[in-house]
Amino acid sequence: MTDYTNLKLSIDGHTATLTLNNPPAHTWTMDSLNALKQLVSDLNTNDEVYALIVHGDGEKFFSAGADLNNFADGDKGRAISMAIALVKHLKRCQPIAA
């Protein structure tokens, strides 16, 4: 199985489970966003997967959002790019017609 940075993927039957795994708050980095893009692409080619569940590892957090260390230099454009990338990659999940 492919290694997705800060993400764990498991497939049980027709359901894929994506676990955010960047403790302690499961924040997003550019590497994990790129991994999400690849993960969604891989799932879109798997005709056996009908559903995707997304959750954070552990009991405290789903995700605190972007890793604020990414913005230490004050580049607001990077924040906008990351937000757009997250939505864009999740929207690439192909719908299943019943």
Image: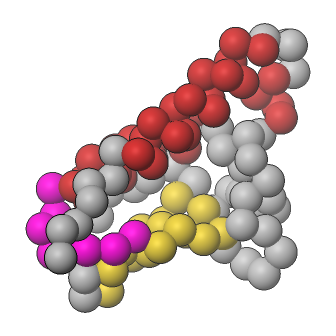
Colouring mode (rainbow / by chain / secondary structure / one colour): secondary structure
Across and down, in percent, residue 17 comes to 44, 74
Q: Residue at x 27, y 47 (%)?
A: 41
Q: Residue at x 82, y 31 (%)?
A: 69
Q: Which residues are magenta?
A: 45-52
Across and down, in percent, residue 83 comes to 63, 33
Quadrant of residue 91 in the image?
top left
Quadrant of residue 22 in the image?
bottom right
In the picture, measured across the screen, residue 94 lies left or right of residue 8, that is left
Q: Does 52 appear above or below 80?
A: below
Quadrant of residue 43 in the image?
bottom left
In the picture, measured across the screen, residue 77 lies left or right of residue 10, that is right
In the picture, measured across the screen, residue 40 lies left or right of residue 21, that is left
Q: Nearer the viewer, residue 1 or 54?
A: 54
Residue 48 forms part of the magenta stretch: yes
Across and down, in percent, residue 14 comes to 25, 82
Across and down, in percent, residue 7 comes to 52, 58
Residue 46 forms part of the magenta stretch: yes
Residue 6 visible, this orientation: yes
